[in-house]
Amino acid sequence: MSLQKQQILNKEIESFDFQSGGEASSDLKNILRKLGVPSAIVRKTAIITYELEMNVVIHSLGGEITALISEDELEIRVDDSGPGIEDLDKAFTAGFSTASDEIREMGFGAGMGLVNVKRYADQIDVKSSKDDGTHVKVIINLAN
Amino acid sequence: MTKKHSVLLKEEKCEGCTNCVKGCPTKAIRVHQGKAWIKEDLCIDCAECIRACEYHAKYTKTDQLDQIMESSEYPVLLIPPSFYSQFSAGIPAQKIKKSIINLGFEAVFDVADAAAALSRKTLDFLNNNSGNYISTSCPVIVRLIKLQYPDLIEMLIPLKSPVELIAERVERKLKEEKNIDPDIFFLTPCPAKLTTVKRAIGQNKSFLTGAIGVENIYQKIYESLADIELEEKEDQLISLATIWGSEGGEEGILRSWQELNTLSVSGIKKAKKLLNEIERNNIPEAIRYFEITSCVDGCIGGVLNVINPFQAQFNLEERIKKIRQITQEHNLVLKKEDDEFYNFALSQKITADNISKLDSNFKKAMQKLEQLQKEIDILPGLDCAACGAPDCKTFAEDVINERASRTDCIFMLRKQLSRLADDLSILANELPPVMASKKEEADDS
């Protein structure tokens, strides 16, 4: 068990809100810089949060992103209210995407979202169901 | 204390408005006591404040011609590609160079020559290394990355800028050939290159002695042009890399040699947007090279230039056409044989300017972060800048770092005054003891 984590970010994300999509990851990036987190970790975090944030914007009915930190760990939780991921294994397959043509035209939906998150995260846990939406928990180690 | 930067404040002209404060991309300016002070460690010399100031209170002090001529025994001048945009393409480059020599310089050199060599080296580098890279030619962009995007430092291509490349070469050449130790000056279109003289990027020390602003000598050159006669039909050929002077020039050269995915962006606002997207991996990986310049339109948009950027763009394009013509007529290719004389590699690693952290101790930084959030919550969030900071969040940070007091915010001041007024009225309504009734006195005792 790690040290008590403190919440440093909590932001609502609205479905299809491409205007503010990306704000949470920018905010978190700035907060981590203020805390003196090494830049390589800040970059990883920016990539992960942006992916997860945009997943909520593109695929869900809306949700929220929360970040908690202790001296040795950063935890990012992204919770949305549905409709859930049908096949989790497929979601972690490179190139697999359920995004509509419309979304793809915007440059999203390359099927690398969760794949990239997994690549940069130290731990990842995804729970998803039709009734309860998708809940992603990512851990990034801060201690060397 | 010597100034680290080249953008300065003319105190007597500053009205204390907050136009520059709001326009600064790194939030480096605060108005205190009616004057807009630049925080040196945040300034990246982008000159946005010079552009924003209607009172011309922000300026750049470059070297003066007469001082150079007085103090230097062997001054030479490096001419940037963008300088040619300041003249109509009908004026031979040779004439412009002669006119500079007539000002007292011993020799002049074209930075474009080094730019061409650098482009070849860049292509070589990209072909031999995987990954995506950012040009280091614009010192503002390099400083911006050091300051606000430290995680992108590894993307900066580890090669010298064309100015430093040619300066080093000229120094070595004159030493070897004539045993002369020259003073090398750069004819600069922007304050950022001037700062580079004092603080070189990725090098222990700059090879430049100083920099002189285009505006400082333009008039003299322009006026003397008519009197200059070229001895014979002197070769007007300057490098095709003169195209580097405007946005897209660097990538244009690269792509003229090889099919390559590149992207060019100019203007600091756009640059920041691009860097944000790069940082969150939201840019196609296929883009191998980014040419980013801080000034809109590239170096021709530099604040020390004289000609407006639209005319400058036209002039440069016309000149490029001419150069192309000559190159084709004489069947010339950009020379390659002298590339080995350049020393491309940076001698030092480019490092981050870690100044955004609240405290070096994590626990203390967390405490401060909490304080900061509280401070932000009580502020009005109007970002009116009347406190002298660009926005409420930045002001809150100044407050918790004890660089500003909460009542510098007029809304907080008003709140405090209103509380004070309430207290006053309560106090005023309290009767002094001599006027209190006898009964009360009796009760008290």
Image: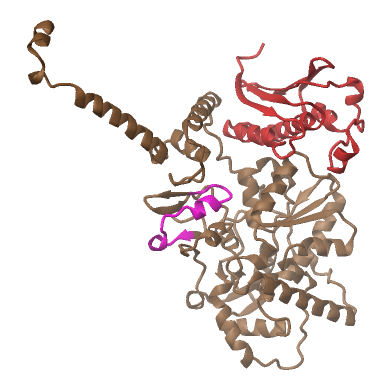
Chain colours: A red, B brown
Q: Quadrant of residue B189?
A: bottom right
Q: Position of residue B44 (x, y in %)?
A: 57, 53
Q: Residue at x 41, y 58 (%)?
A: B15
| Nearest the eye: B434 or B48 | B434
Q: Does residue A143 appear in the picture of this structure?
A: no
When the figure is inspected, residue B345 is found, relative to residue B311, above or below; the finding is: above
Q: Position of residue B319 (x, y in %)?
A: 76, 78
Q: Residue at x 56, y 70 (%)?
A: B213
Q: Indicate the quadrant containing the C terminus of chain B: top left, top right, bottom left or bottom right.
A: top left
When the figure is inspected, residue B27 is found, relative to residue B118, above or below; the finding is: above
Q: Quadrant of residue B429?
A: top left
In-image side of B426 versus A48 (left or right): left
Q: Residue at x 65, y 34 (%)?
A: A29
Whether residue B51 appears in magenta in the rendering, the answer is no
Q: Residue at x 55, y 35 (%)?
A: B357
| Nearest the eye: A139 or B432 | B432
In-image side of B45 versus B233 (left or right): left
Whether residue B11 appears in magenta in the rendering, the answer is yes
Q: Position of residue B431 (x, y in %)?
A: 15, 21
Q: Does residue B388 appear in the picture of this structure?
A: yes
Q: Which residues lie in the magenta part?
A: B8-29
Q: Quadrant of residue A112?
A: top right
Q: Position of residue A62 (x, y in %)?
A: 74, 26
| Nearest the eye: A144 or A43 | A43
How many numbered dots are placed on residues in this image?
0
